[in-house]
Amino acid sequence: MMAEPDLSGQLEKMQREWDERARENARFYVNTERQDWTDAEFFQSGERTVAEEILTDMINICQGKDPKRMRVLEIGCGAGRVTRALAQIFGEVYGVDISGEMVRQARAALADLPGVHIFQNSGKDLDVLASTRFDFAFSSIVFQHIPSREVIESYVLAVRSRLRRGRLFKFQIQGGETLDNPPDDTWLGVTFSEQEARDMALRCDFEMRYSFGAGTQYFWLWYFKPKFLSPAWRQHREYRLRVTYRRWRGRVAKLLRKQ
């Protein structure tokens, strides 16, 4: 088995290769159904995705809340294909993408929508969004390209910290079991079994309430953030706080010794 490349190298490679794809033909690499998308056709394809994955699932997504009063997050917004369709339903839409070129194109295409906010992120976290909180998070045909379980799990943890309690993170991963791709492939990405998806949910303190498409390319997961902290997650948080405090105390002691 080949060793997984270091994380910083993976992220640099992801950003570089997605910038190259975006400059070559962003809309094709966002949706490979065709190479010569018109504006209308490209954004209509995003409307189809939303019709299939969002409008059929509004009970889980909204949980009784008016969608126009909801702030939602899209991970891997690309050139804004799905983002525009989401903005027709929800009050505010935040999109992030690792590719600066994709972000540039998405901002240009969605400049007429005041409720849409597009950011370039690191490719593994949501630090660029500071402490912004969300009522729903979504990701489609994005994680299937990420070559690292560590990166995907980092995203899941980042979503958990910004998602309101009881709310849903619905996302798609690569579930194909027959893929034999290199560990740094930013197109095919890493695969998950259903058990691996459940284990990740537990580690990140999500309830994996539903799944669909295990063993296929389009493996969909419904991760709900618990309404209350689980005992295991409470212990984990307390441990992290203790570690942070010890590090801070050590830095202070070092500074005092230098005086």
Image: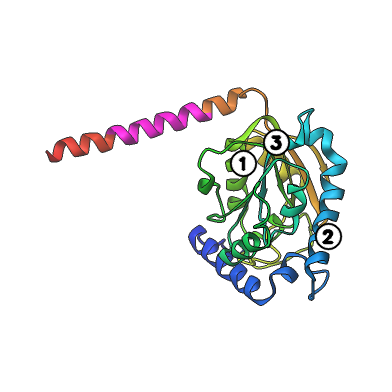
Q: Which amino acid type is shown beneath numbered disc 3?
A: Met
Q: According to the image, label 3 marks what residue?
A: 70
Q: Which amino acid type is shown beneath numbered disc 2?
A: Gln
The residue lying at 15 percent from left, 37 percent from top is 257
Q: Which mark is residue 59?
A: none
Instruction: Please report whichever mark, 3 or 1, sits nearer to the chain's N-terminal start.
Output: 3
Q: Nearer the viewer, mark 3 or mark 1?
A: 3
Q: Residues within 10 Å of mark 3 (few under 14, many from 20)?
A: some
Where in the figure is residue 68, as x and y percent of width and height?
74, 37
Q: According to the image, label 2 marks what residue?
A: 44
Where in the figure is residue 9, as x and y percent of width and height?
50, 64
Residue closer to the observer: 170 or 91: 91
Visible residue check, residue 161? yes
From what the image shows, is residue 213 above or below residue 238? below
Q: Main secondary structure of the magenta part?
A: helix
Instruction: Please report whichever mark, 2 or 3, sits nearer to the chain's N-terminal start.
Output: 2
On the image, which quarter does residue 30 sit in? bottom right
From what the image shows, is residue 166 above or below residue 173? above
Q: Quadrant of the C terminus?
A: top left
Magenta stretch bounds: 236-249
Where in the figure is residue 28, as x and y percent of width and height?
75, 71
- Asked if the residues shown at circle 3 and circle 1 are in contact, with their CB atoms under 8 angstroms apart, the answer is no
Residue closer to the observer: 107 or 98: 107
- Badge 3 element: loop
Q: Which mark is residue 159?
A: 1
Visible residue check, residue 215? no
